[in-house]
Amino acid sequence: MFIEGDDLRARMKQEYLRMTLANVIRSERFSYITDITGLPDFVFNDRKTSSSEINDNNELIRTADEYDIQQIRMWQYSLKSQKEQRRKILLHGSPVEPIEVAVKVTWGHPIYVSITLGGAGGCGKSRVTEAISAFMGFHNRFHTLRSLAPSSAAAVGINGLTMQSMLREGHRKSNTNTILMQSEILTIENEWRNIDYCLIDEISMVGCYMLARFHKITTTAKHTEPSIPFGGINMIFLGDFVQYGPVLDRPLYSNLLSTQDTLEDTLNLTKQTAKQRNVTERDIQCKVGRALWLQVNKVFFLIEQMRNKDPLFMDMQSRLRRGECNDDDYKMLCKRVVSPENEVKSLREAPWNSATMLVFRNEVRTNINNYCVFDESKKNNYLPMVVVANDRVRNVEIDNIDLRRFLLSIPDNKTEGLPGYLPIVPNMPVLITHNIATELHISNGSIGRLIRLVIEEGENLRLDNTGDPKFPNNTVCIRKPLYALVELPQCKLASSLTDLEPTIIPIVPEQKTIKIDLKSFISPMQKRLLNNKTSITITRSQLPIVPAFALTTHKCQGKTLSYGIIDLVPPPYSKPDLANIYVPISRFTSRDTMAILRHFPASILNQKPHPDMIAELKRLENLHRLNQTIK
Ligand SMILES: Nc1ncnc2c1ncn2[C@@H]1O[C@H](COP(=O)(O)OP(=O)(O)OP(=O)(O)O)[C@@H](O)[C@H]1O
């Protein structure tokens, strides 16, 4: 019975993937792929795949010499030192700014301010952070301001640091140990010594538990009573609760306490509930986080739309936020469905043939990307190429070909951002999947362009039987990349590799230890023999990049897209979430720059926000109104 349920689930997911790909093909996004089963016969202009020809004629791939190896080592050293230098500036201020003695705050008197700046997607909340930084800089107080965000992409957007790096996550082997060591306390004190103001962007992604830990760190740093929120640092929160929420945490709007409760009440409540069974330390910390959030004493909403200048589209989005779209809204969006009868007839021509696709599932994203890469290769008469990850178990290569293929086919969101297969074509857009140097804007979520792949000497480019059976049958597999050159215009590096621009950076392979569940690989009989212990631990080495023709909707939060195609059909077994629809739809400057992949159910436009979110937005709006009346 259980296996049947699992089987049905897998089949429905497969069908969703198949239907989505069929719709991408129907929309004429590809020039050469006309059938989803057509790739194995995808002949590339009869070109042979001898390794000498690949090396001679391929402008994408170059074999490294001694000089390259020496250069990349020097570059990595330079990256590390520039990263440390930039982090120091972000933590302690620029050396050119005269550092004044920090103003002494009289602890015990709650003189701090805690401001929330809300507003719909595109109202310019992130831009306000620039204004605050400029203001602080103008008054020589920049070193007293800290800018943070709960994701590396958002941190890059505000020129700040991630909250996780401030919570000292990743500094310890076990996350469960929350007791700080003496040396850590000294570092924390030092990091926060000058800080009087802290702004946190994308607050919807900060959970109650995270906020409570942040409070603990700042309280430790400033040596204050736990009842003084955030060690008395003046806080500015920016964000929109309708957008994506925290991962594995409770959103700050969760009604874990009555709105009348103060932090002191919570601390007392903590003592009571801790005695009860089934209340974990984490539950208590979540309540502390919620109580801290309720201490916000100033609220402002930005109301002018800065991203979207299309009045009808703007009104539709306002209704979408409340789950109150009408028939006209649905009809308006249906006109953007790619179809010969509608406004966007097909995706064959510019700008649509290079517009980013936004989809819900990682499997869908990976498959569309693979098709885009092979289609592009065919269009430009390049041989299809794939960089194959190097997987090992206890430092030994896996000799079972089926197991190797199974491991390589696992989506990269389950393999720590290291794809099993990385198809490549010159100039393709790429997404960086690791935080290489967030401080220098080279982080998970950064988008660039692939310029070249430099491979190790002795790499024998060949057809390889570990390739995915769905790939073109003359695909060349590359197993030993030395580095990939990626153009990242937003990168803040000062030095370059040899004679290249500083915005063209080498991305080197990374290694990760990953636990993999083999449940869907082995038979029920083998499972019984293994006593249901179906997981193995592998070490994977691969370049931390994936093609970025298509992205999941999570990756577009905070961004403004020039053109894009969105898929609004919810995947099977997915929980309804208003953010899934609101976030991608609110990335555009007008309806005309957005196309919709296929017809979608009207019901998705009427998903109601969570009742706790509605109550929280009402509470914040009341505070906002109150602020308006204060002279
Ligand atoms: N004052 C302004 N003048 C001109 N353009 C602006 C201004 N403020 C914001 N913008 C532009 O509007 C767009 C949206 O701004 P921003 O990303 O700051 O909005 P946001 O409220 O943070 O959106 P989201 O909640 O979706 O992240 C950006 O392209 C930005 O450059």
Image (tube, helix red, strand yellow):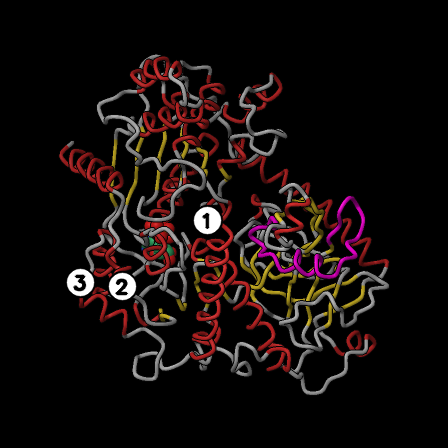
Q: Which residue is mark 1?
A: 157
Does the beta carbon of the residue at mark 1 sit less than 8 Å from ligand 1?
yes
- The answer to whether residue 48 is left or right of residue 582 is right
Instruction: Please tell me whether mark 2 or mark 3 is closer to you in this view.
Output: 3
- The answer to whether residue 265 is left or right of residue 208 is left
Which quadrant would residue 390 be assigned to in this image? bottom right
Which quadrant would residue 173 be assigned to in this image? top right
Q: Of the residues under marks 1 and 3, which one precedes in the sequence?
A: 1
Q: Which mark is residue 309?
A: 2
Q: Which residue is mark 3?
A: 326
- The answer to whether residue 481 is left or right of residue 450 is right
CA distance separating discs 1 and 3? 34 Å
Does the beta carbon of the residue at mark 3 sit less than 8 Å from ligand 1?
no
- Please tell me which residue is depicted at 20% across the width and 35% down the height of the picture: 619
Q: Position of residue 14 (x, y in %)?
A: 49, 64
Q: Amino acid at mark 1?
A: Gly
Label 1 crowding class (10 Å Cα cut-off): few <14, some 14-19, many 20+? Answer: many
Extreme residue in the bottom direction: 46
- Please tell me which residue is depicted at 78% across the width and 54% down the height of the picture: 71
Along the viewing direction, whichever of 589 and 36 lies nearer the viewer = 36
Q: Amino acid at mark 2?
A: Lys
Q: Position of residue 198 (x, y in %)?
A: 41, 32
Extreme residue in the left direction: 629
Q: Position of residue 522 (x, y in %)?
A: 65, 53
Q: Are marks 2 and 3 in contact (CB under 8 Å)?
A: no
Q: Position of residue 179 (x, y in %)?
A: 55, 19
CA distance separating discs 1 and 2? 22 Å
Examine the structure image and report whether residue 405 is included in the region drawn in magenta.
yes
CA distance separating discs 2 and 3? 21 Å
SS of the residue at dot 3? Answer: loop
The segment highlighted magenta reads 391-416
